[in-house]
Image (spheres, rainbow, N blue to C red):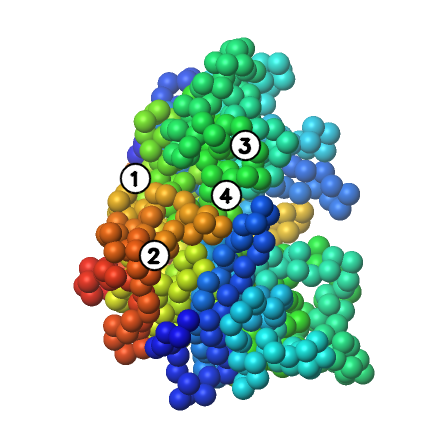
Amino acid sequence: MSTAGAERVGAAAGNDGAPGDRLLEIQNLRTYLKTSRGVVRAVDGVSLELRPGTTLGLVGESGCGKSMLLRSILGLLPRRSVERQGRILFEGQDLLSLPPSRLRRILGRDIGYVAQDPMTSLNPVLKVGQQVGETLRCHYGVSRSKARAEALELLQSVGIPEAERRLDQYPHQLSGGMRQRVSIAAALACHPKLLLADEPTTALDVTVQAQVLELLSRLARERSMAMILVTHDLGVVAGRTEQIAVMYAGQVVELSPTSDLFGNIQMPYTEALFKSIPRLSDVPHHRLVSIPGRPPDLRMQPTGCRFASRCTYTQPQCLTDAPALTEPGTSGHAYACWFPLGLQPEDPPADSAAPTGAPVGPARPARRQ
Amino acid sequence: MGDLLVQLRPERDPLLRVEHLVVEFPAGRGQRVHAVSGVSFDILRGETLSLVGETGSGKSTTALAIAQLPKPNSGSVIFDGQDLTQLGRKELRAVRPRFQLIFQDPISSLNPRRRLTDSVAEPLRLAGRGAEAKQLADAMLEAVGMDAELAASRWPSDFSGGQCQRASIARALVLDPDLLICDEPVSSLDVSVQAQILNLLHDLRERYGLTILFISHDLAVVRNVSDRIAVMYLGKLCEIGEADALYRRPRHPYTCALIEAIPAPDPTSRPKATSILGVEPPSPITPPSGCRYRTRCPRAQEICAVEEPTLQRVEDDHYVACHFPVAEHAAGVA
């Protein structure tokens, strides 16, 4: 985990896709959507790698390109109006240049996908058992009865009580948490090597969220499955990932091993996300820290750092030059910022009870340009 | 139903007093959904009460029953001395401007074919104040941090969820209500926007002296806005009390489970596997006998299935309905 980031930053386009220890390698991916109102740069030069069996948390606000990145990997984009550049190497094969017939053998079998809203991602007129067994029937041509037996086992493994009876129910007969378990079961049917989970718990209650996250972590561990977990909440990925990538305006702005990130946030955007999480340890009627403004319009040609207009530490240089994602140390912690937050550790969450009137950040040493 | 309502504070002249509220819906085949089963609480003027619980605990139904949408099956809702359940259509219509609602999904709660300003001005027009509607709507939009000029020419689809929620808040406040009922107002928003809206509600409360009923499934979210917290489970109150005491010394096992479920933004802390509620809540059509939480409760014993616990005072303004409340130092937030 520690060296992977270093290689990636140094040689984004080099190293001709030797499978080696990398399951997924995204090289300088650009996904542009051509709309009637201009070109939307939904993903704008993202490079990431994932080793087998590890979990990456992809974090950012709505409209930062997280979901578009996942959908670019899956090719779940309209063919006509979308342009994808770069390479997405999955076990050494470039998903962007594979013909659809080959792709179909990978997607759903080696790469599973769990969408945010299980109500709309499940087919409302198919029974649960059919939907879970469907991928098995497609990819391995197993018989109906075999698929049903497998589906039963899968439903049990994701913790659905009375799984036998649930097989013949329709999605609307299940609660939100149960539906999400069903879509996880369906995604896991073919034992994928990589699971892409797009905000799998955002539509769920806190208690159910905890159950579903625990389930995903357990399954990933048991099956040595790699996972990309997308969320807007840093709290969700804190205890469950090896690496975290923070996305802003279509780009990765901070990438770090999870163990290093929380005590050592470098990018002001990550800090702002971190501080906007409401905490139990806050005093009542304490003012929450929010990020002013909203993510930029991805149709605009950006100049300088894309976060500059919302950043509390903006300097003249931020407005003119775009910082690249660089990794100064060897810990695998990379960030795109001209004036990183320095090495002063953040307050641990338990100590943040002190009321703070200041906008973002504790006192930090003055920065020099 | 003659039990004492120890948690009420009639001597302090609350703005809203809800007593023995019961809401049931027919579920076919002679069955009934017991959505809210005898809930009682009060809210003092200027106070914020948060109603917390999982989906299906009856929080939203309680909120809607207070607003008489529809009227509850039984129980009383006394708003500033008047029992709303006893009022006729006309009388109710006269009181309605004094309590307003904000809903979870800001985009679907605004009419997509109407410009934002028109949506915000509509309550004024209905109240027969059409002449000043535009001006007041603009002022209120500015007060919630929106550009009134932009709102006058654009539709909800042109705005983000957070912006639309601001407009919904403006619409709710434009008639200058006494009570604002917020039904999961930030649940569908990003963490960063969530903070903006919570801060806004906090500011507006100070500025307009609002009394707020705030509904959420997330105890961390209500931390900053609440004076008092009521925890609901399957149509019953489990615990109610002053916010700080409830966070520091949660006494009901369900409250503890809700607190422990919140993901901490700290890689070293993971929720204890044992504390995660493994089982789904039972159906409100056939709620368990005795204590309704017993089927998921790690502390449940025989008596819990037989006898329903009533709210008991455990300390100043802190009441819990549990036969075996959690010891004071066992859980809670430092």
- Residue A116 horizontal/vertical position (percent): 53, 41
Q: Nearer the viewer, residue A333 or A263?
A: A263
Residue drawn at the location 58% of the way across and 46% of the way down: B29
Q: At numbered mark 1, what does the secondary structure look like: helix, strand or loop?
A: loop
A100 is higher (above) or lower (below) than B29: above
Q: Quadrant of residue B321?
A: bottom left
Q: CA distance from mark 1 to mark 2?
A: 56 Å
Q: Please indicate whether residue B21 sits to the left or right of residue B257 in the image.
A: right
Label 1 resides on the chain identified as A
Marker disc for residue A175: 4
Q: At numbered mark 4, what does the secondary structure look like: helix, strand or loop?
A: loop
Marker disc for residue A169: 3
Residue drawn at the location 40% of the way across and 55% of the way down: A274
B105 is higher (above) or lower (below) than B41: above
Label 4 resides on the chain identified as A
Tag 4–tag 2 contact (CB < 8 Å): no
**Dots 3 and 4 on the same chain:** yes
Marker disc for residue A331: 1
Q: Nearer the viewer, residue B264 or B248?
A: B248
- Residue B8 horizontal/vertical position (percent): 39, 79
Residue drawn at the location 34% of the way across and 72% of the way down: B241
**Is the residue marked by circle 2 packed among few (<14), some (14-19), or many (20+) residues within 10 Å?**
some
Q: Quadrant of residue B84?
A: bottom right
Mark earlier in primary sequence (1, 4): 4
Question: Mark 2 sits on what residue?
Answer: B290
